[in-house]
Image (tube, helix red, strand yellow):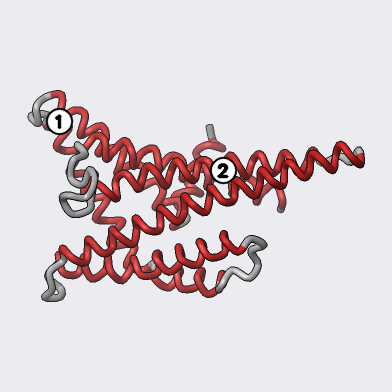
């Protein structure tokens, strides 16, 4: 019990962990609030309160992202053109993803500032542009994960052939590859869940834009959030084991 409490505290003390928790609460509240409101024809006070709570948490995350630009710049600079990547396709996709993510932040900041009446511009086009960039990033992220999975499966086949021919023990490599494939599959699920919401927030007339009820937006976001929490926990556990 004490260990679990300590893990939660450590999670909330980091910016990345706190954002994951707030995101999960945001979409979870929207999911439950949407279900309650729909079942009671919009008359549920609890449902309305949960939807309002979700909106406030979303607004909180938007404001906190005002400070993410420099972190993104630092990451993009450290990755550069991805010269450390062995595969050129993964490298190109990753660079394009970094560009989309880098451009996303200032577009969202301008949209937020316009809604807050800090600047005199219309926010609609800036929200649309930021959503387009987010959509592009999600698509690229899913494509990157698919490419990585293909490369890992190729590596697995090569390891199995080497093991059969030379009698060497490649069990550790295979275990690592299977774990990485699992993480990439979860990444694809997360990207697709977020992508469904991103399209919902696009201008009317684009696929299912504007057609999702609150509970479905909450469900997709909750799935993505739980996947993100799981992947972050697995990554932290791996780092601790290797320390």
**Mark 1 burial class by Cα count in 10 Å: few <14, some 14-19, many 20+:** many
Secondary structure beneath dot 2 equals helix
Residue at x 43% of width, y 39% of height: 226
Q: As rendered, which of 113 and 160 lies closer to the eye?
A: 160
Disc ID at residue 37: 1
- For marks 2 and 1, the one nearer the N-term is 1
- Residue 58 at x, y = what percent? 26, 51
* Disc on res. 13: none
Left of 167 or right of it: where is 44?
Answer: left
Regarding residue 81, the answer to whether it shows in the image is: yes
Q: Give the percent coordinates (x, y) of residue 173.
A: 76, 44
Q: Are marks 2 and 1 in contact (CB under 8 Å)?
A: no
Residue in the foreground of this view, choosing between 103 and 43: 103
According to the image, label 2 marks what residue?
A: 183
- Name the image quarter holding residue 28: top left
Secondary structure beneath dot 1 equals helix
Percent x, y for residue 88? 60, 64
- The count of marks equals 2
Is the residue 113 above or below the residue 87 in the image? below
Residue 133's place in the image compared with 209, above or below, is: below
Which residue is pictured at 28% across the width and 38% down the height?
218
Nearest the viewer among 25 and 101 is: 101
Drawn side of residue 23 relative to residue 15, left or right: left
Q: Is residue 6 visible?
A: no
Q: Spatial distance from mark 2 to mark 1, Cα to Cα?
A: 35 Å
Identify the residue shown where x is 20% and y is 33%: 34
Where does residue 199 sit, x and y in percent of width and height? 27, 49
């Amino acid at each position: 019990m004490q260990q679990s409490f300590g893990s939660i505290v450590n999670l909330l003390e980091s910016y990345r962990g706190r954002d994951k928790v707030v995101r999960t609460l945001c979409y979870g509240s929207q999911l439950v609030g949407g279900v309650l409101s729909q079942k009671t024809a919009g008359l549920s006070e609890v449902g309305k309160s949960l939807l309002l709570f979700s909106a406030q948490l979303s607004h909180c995350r938007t404001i906190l992202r005002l400070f993410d630009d420099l972190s993104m710049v630092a990451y993009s600079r450290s990755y550069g053109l991805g010269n450390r990547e062995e595969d050129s396709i993964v490298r190109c996709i990753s660079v394009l993803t970094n560009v989309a993510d880098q451009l996303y932040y200032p577009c969202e900041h301008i949209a937020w500032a316009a809604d807050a009446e800090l600047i005199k511009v219309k926010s609609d086009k800036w929200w649309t542009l930021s959503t387009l960039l987010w959509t592009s990033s999600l698509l690229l992220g899913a494509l990157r994960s698919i490419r990585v999975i293909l490369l890992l499966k190729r590596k697995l086949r090569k390891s199995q052939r080497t093991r059969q021919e030379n009698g060497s023990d490649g069990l550790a490599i295979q275990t690592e590859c299977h774990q990485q494939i699992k993480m990439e599959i979860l990444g694809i699920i997360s990207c697709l869940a977020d992508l469904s919401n991103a399209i919902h927030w696009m201008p009317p007339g684009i696929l299912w834009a504007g057609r999702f009820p609150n509970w479905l937006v909450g469900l997709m976001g909750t799935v993505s959030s739980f996947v993100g929490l799981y992947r972050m926990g697995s990554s932290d556990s791996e780092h601790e084991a290797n320390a």
